[in-house]
Amino acid sequence: MSANITADDEGKRVVNAQGDEIGVVHEVERGTAHVKPDPGMTDTIKSKLGWGEADQETYALDTDSVDRITDDEIRLGRL
């Protein structure tokens, strides 16, 4: 799914397919969500999202990873 992410999605939780929170949308810029990761998120999950191991403030979310967007969260598909 190619998600249509807008400024209305700022502040939403980003969760994996199992419903575990991996971060929060910090801001949306030109249709790309920039996610502030949950401090407990593992490097394995970051790697699967293409976020690498760098200790950045936020990471760009690949819209191809998004399964669906609800009023409260952005749910990712299987990683």
Image: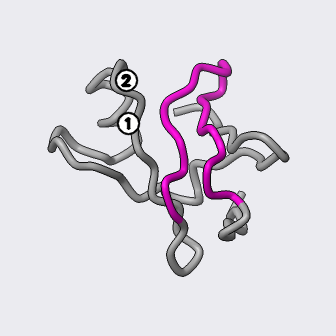
Q: In the current view of this chain or complex, which residue is farthest to the right?
A: 71
Q: In the current view of this chain or complex, which residue is farthest to the bottom?
A: 30
The residue segment tinted magenta is 9-27
Residue appearing at x 35%, y 18% in the figure: 40
Residue 48, numbered label: 1
Q: Position of residue 17 (x, y in %)?
A: 65, 27
Q: Position of residue 71 (x, y in %)?
A: 84, 46
Question: Which residue in the structure is indicated by mark 2?
Answer: 41
Left or right, residue 55 beside residue 73: left
> How many residues crowd mark 2 within 10 Å: few (<14), some (14–19), many (20+)?
few
Figure check: 48 above or below 20:
below
What element does badge 2 sit on?
loop
What element does badge 1 sit on?
helix
Figure check: 20 above or below 27:
above
Circle 2: residue type:
Met
Left or right, residue 29 beside residue 11: left
> How many residues crowd mark 1 within 10 Å: few (<14), some (14–19), many (20+)?
few
Residue appearing at x 68%, y 64% in the figure: 2
Left or right, residue 2 beside residue 56: right
Residue appearing at x 45%, y 49% in the figure: 35
Figure check: 14 above or below 26:
above
Q: Nearer the viewer, residue 43 or 1?
A: 43
Which colour style is shown? one colour
Q: Position of residue 13 (x, y in %)?
A: 62, 38
